[in-house]
Image (tube, rainbow, N blue to C red):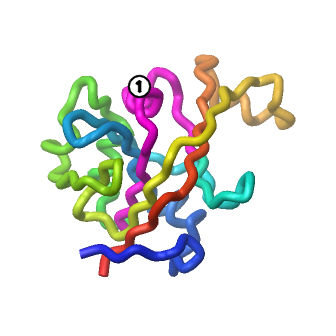
Amino acid sequence: MFKEINIRDLKKSPVSMLADEWALLTAGDENKFNTMTVSWGAVGELWGKDVVICFVRPQRYTYEFLENSDTFTLTFFGGEYKKELGFCGSKSGRDFDKVKETGFVPMKTGDGISFEQAETVIVCKKIAFQDMSPNGFLSDDIMSNYGNNDYHRTYVGEIEKVLVKE
């Protein structure tokens, strides 16, 4: 069972949740969706709205779903599903049924999809995107993330709902 809270009432730092525990970024609907592991991102305030900022490379299967969806979710598991998250981050949904392979149970969460095993779910409405460009990189070491010139698309999602397991 989940209860809705305000993003400001999270007990854990969203930075440590993303960087240390990782999350699943999911887009699509109950009929067809894809999910991928993320450990980069941001949670904050932009344009007077509480937002999540995600970064997805164009070759990722989830990119197609983000392009065609108004909603996406970030699902956090509290660090206990690292093996499954590793799978979801290294294997493509084009080639594998991630739900079958991991045992994650999808659940409809507002207009998005998350997973029953979650500890925390952030449901977002996509409000902006911007493609990254090396022209904006001010530190030379950033380019080491882009050996194939496959620059991320940045998605900004307004936080519509935050759910925590009771």
Task: Indicate left or right for 31 with 112 as reference.
Answer: left
Name, please, the residue furthest toward the top: 148
Q: Which residues fall within the magenta stretch?
A: 54-78
Q: How many marks?
A: 1
Q: Residue at x 35, y 64 (%)?
A: 77
Above/below status of 49 relative to 61: below
Residue 58 on the magenta span: yes
Mark 1 element type = helix
Task: Indicate left or right for 165 with 56 as reference.
Answer: left
Q: Residue at x 35, y 47 (%)?
A: 86
Quarter placement of the C terminus: bottom left
Q: Residue at x 31, y 29 (%)?
A: 92
Taking depth in this image into account, of 37 and 110 the one nearest to the observer is: 110
Quarter placement of the N terminus: bottom left
Q: Give the residue at mark 1.
A: 64
What amino acid type is highlighted by mark number 1? Glu
Taking depth in this image into account, of 70 and 143 the one nearest to the observer is: 70
Q: Position of residue 24 (x, y in %)?
A: 39, 50
Q: Position of residue 67 (x, y in %)?
A: 47, 28
Taking depth in this image into account, of 56 and 158 the one nearest to the observer is: 158
